[in-house]
Structure formats: structure tokens, C-alpha cells
Image: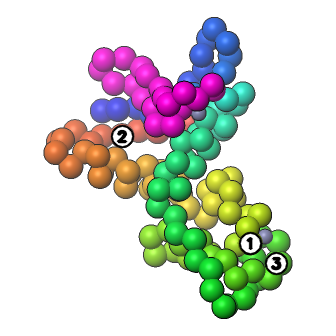
Amino acid sequence: MRYFAPRQNRFNGLWHFTVQEESGISAYGPCADGCPGHKTPQGALEHFAGSLLDKRKQLIRDGNFRPCMICGGTTNQRVRIGRKELSLCQEHQDTKTLLRFFDFESLMRDEMRGQDENKKDSGLLILPP
Ligand SMILES: [Zn+2]
Ligand SMILES: [Zn+2]
């Protein structure tokens, strides 16, 4: 079982997205890659969620103009992840907005399933910040 959660560095008060395994707790994903840390647990979660979304999202731009689902402004851009497709203007393709439509836990589960193909124990629990 691996436990994923944003955790606070008690020396500088900053948050990283982390994984807890038998061997101990360590920063995970983009937070393990030179990230200076985040002021809030939500910041750490969004950093990681953003990397999952970036990996999987497809940006579509064509001749179909529709209203943006957030601001109603006309846009010919859509974001597709899996089978879901959303009309979103450039300004509203950020992680925070996308997480309103794409469930973080299911993104995470898909990610883990890919990684753990050869492992029996793909248990995963995301702790609330
Ligand atoms: Zn980070
Ligand atoms: Zn918009």
C-alpha cells in the first residue's frame, strides 16, 4: 500500500506532494524534481495533478466556435481527456479549472495502474490535505 498526500516540511513550512511507502516518505512526481515546495497543501496537490493532466490532455483547435464553459466567451479550443471533451477558452485551461471537471482520484488511479502493471500491490490511498 502506498499513501499519497501533500505533506508539510516542518523545517520551512512548505508543502510537497509525497508518497509514503515501507521505506519511508518521499516527495513524489514533479514535487520530487527540483520543486521548491508550495505554500499550501492545495498548491502541492495541484502541482502533481497538473502533471497528470498535462500528460493526458489533448488540446483541440478547429473551426467550431462554441462558448467557453466557464466564462461563456467564444472559443474554438477544446480540452479532451479520455472520452471527455470540454469547450474552454485559453484562459480557462488551467489545472484548477480542469480539476472541476476531471476527478483527481480517477486520474491518479489510471496513473498507478499504468505503473504497477507488474506489481500485485497497486493499493493506493489519497489522504485529504
Ligand atoms: Zn511541487
Ligand atoms: Zn473562458
Q: Is mark 1 within 8 Å of ligand 2?
A: yes
Report which residue position mark 3 lands on: 72
The amino acid at mark 3 is Gly
Colour option used: rainbow
The amino acid at mark 2 is Leu
Report which residue position mark 2 lands on: 124
Pointers 2 and 1 in contact (C-beta within 8 Å):
no
Cα gap from disc 3 to disc 1, whole angstroms: 9 Å
Q: What span is in magenta? A: 19-37
Say the numbered circle drawn on residue 98: none
Report which residue position mark 1 lands on: 89
**Residue placed at 22% from the left, 39% from the top?**
121
**Residue placed at 66% from the left, 91% from the top?**
63
Q: Position of residue 102 (x, y in %)?
A: 56, 61
| Precedes in sequence: disc 2 or disc 1 | 1
Residue 79, compared with residue 115, is above or below; it is: below
- Residue 35 appears in the figure: yes
Cα gap from disc 2 to disc 1, whole angstroms: 34 Å
- Residue 17 appears in the figure: no
- Quadrant into which the N terminus falls: top left
